[in-house]
Image (cartoon, helix red, strand yellow):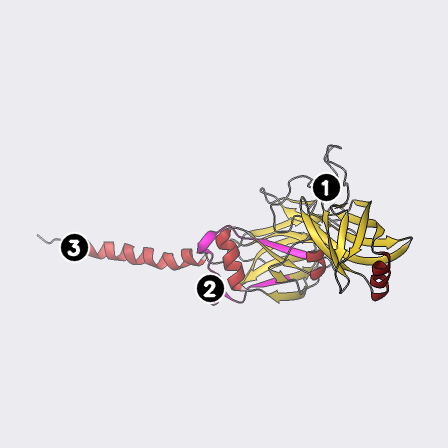
Amino acid sequence: MRYVSSRRPILVVAVALGALLPAAAAQATFHLEKVNEVLLAGSGGDAGVQFVELLDKGGTEEAFTPVFAPYKLVVYDGAGKQLAEQTLDPNGLRAAASAGTEYLLSTAAADSAFGVKGDEKLTVTLPADAGQVCFQGSPGNVSCMSYGSITKPAALSSQGTGAVHGPVPAAGLSDQRQSDDTVKATTPTPKAANRADVAGASGGTSTPFAGMTLGSHSATVGSSGTFAISISCPKAAKASCSGSIAISVKGQTWARRHVAVPAGRRQSVKLRLSAEHRAALRSARRVRTAVRIVASDGSGARKTTHGRLTLRPA
């Protein structure tokens, strides 16, 4: 009687399983990255205020290894023509995925408008009317967010997170991916969780933007002409407050600067007097000024507030 060894079938099965492991592991290196939020213009229609936010919740398994590099942000028009691309830092992407946090690509103007700091500078320009914004790793696009009229969708890798489509967001609003992979245009949330409500559709229950407020009543001016005051952005503001502050005496502007403060925060702001105004202050020993703050929040709501500030020389 002959006995057939059972080792060979077991070995074959083991080899077959081993062959599947590299493919499974490869899918957990960068394929869970998603285009999460896209802003085309600031509340005043400034096309220089743009950002793209990526999000990967794959944790430490999303290693962004060199074998699948380079990792890119690629922009297409509505007809599928590539307009621009930007190579991304795999170390930054890996750290954000490990922490499960948003990865922000933003212009300097967007950082200023929203009081945030992008993880990388956005070096590509997003088209205003119709576009496709994609995250790419070898061999192709992993995730895309499109907006407007799309006649030819950008090609996607079969192992990616897919494409989502939204409206062309109005100035001051951003397209945001929802948990069900729909896209809504709403108040921007760079470096924060997306909003589920549609901007302007809160049924009148939202708090009107109150503007920024002055937190200082007096300030000491140093020998170089610099002085600091505090200003606050209300907690109910959308994302952040940004605008300008002007200090004037009898209708003449003594100091002015741009300001940006996150919602719910108070921030110290430095201003400077000219040599002429420093001399006038030293002569008077005390000058009472009028303060005017013109600000808007992330929804585009605008408000002008006023205050009084007494200046004294050091």
Q: Earlier in the sequence, mark 1 or mark 3?
A: 3
Residue of label 3: 5
Tell whether position 63 is magenta: yes
Residue 241 place in picture, x, y as percent: 73, 48
Which of the 4 image quarters holds residue 80?
A: bottom right
What's the residue at 24%, 54% (across, down)? Answer: 10
Residue 6 place in picture, x, y as percent: 19, 53
Q: Earlier in the sequence, mark 1 or mark 2?
A: 2
Q: Which range is magenta?
A: 50-74
Residue 199 is marked as 1
Tell whether position 129 is magenta: no
Q: Secondary structure at mark 2?
A: loop
- Quarter of the picture containing the C terminus is bottom right
Residue of label 2: 65
**Residue sitting nearer the eye, 5 or 242:** 242
Q: Secondary structure at mark 1?
A: loop
Residue 194 place in picture, x, y as percent: 62, 45
Tell me how far mark 1 sits from mark 2, CA to CA. Answer: 39 Å
Q: Residues within 10 Å of mark 3 (few under 14, many from 20)?
A: few
The extreme left residue here reads 1
Mark closer to the observer (1, 3):
1
Tag 2: amino acid: Thr
Mark closer to the observer (3, 2):
2
Residue 178 is marked as none
Tell me how far mark 3 sits from mark 2, CA to CA. Answer: 42 Å
Tag 3: amino acid: Ser
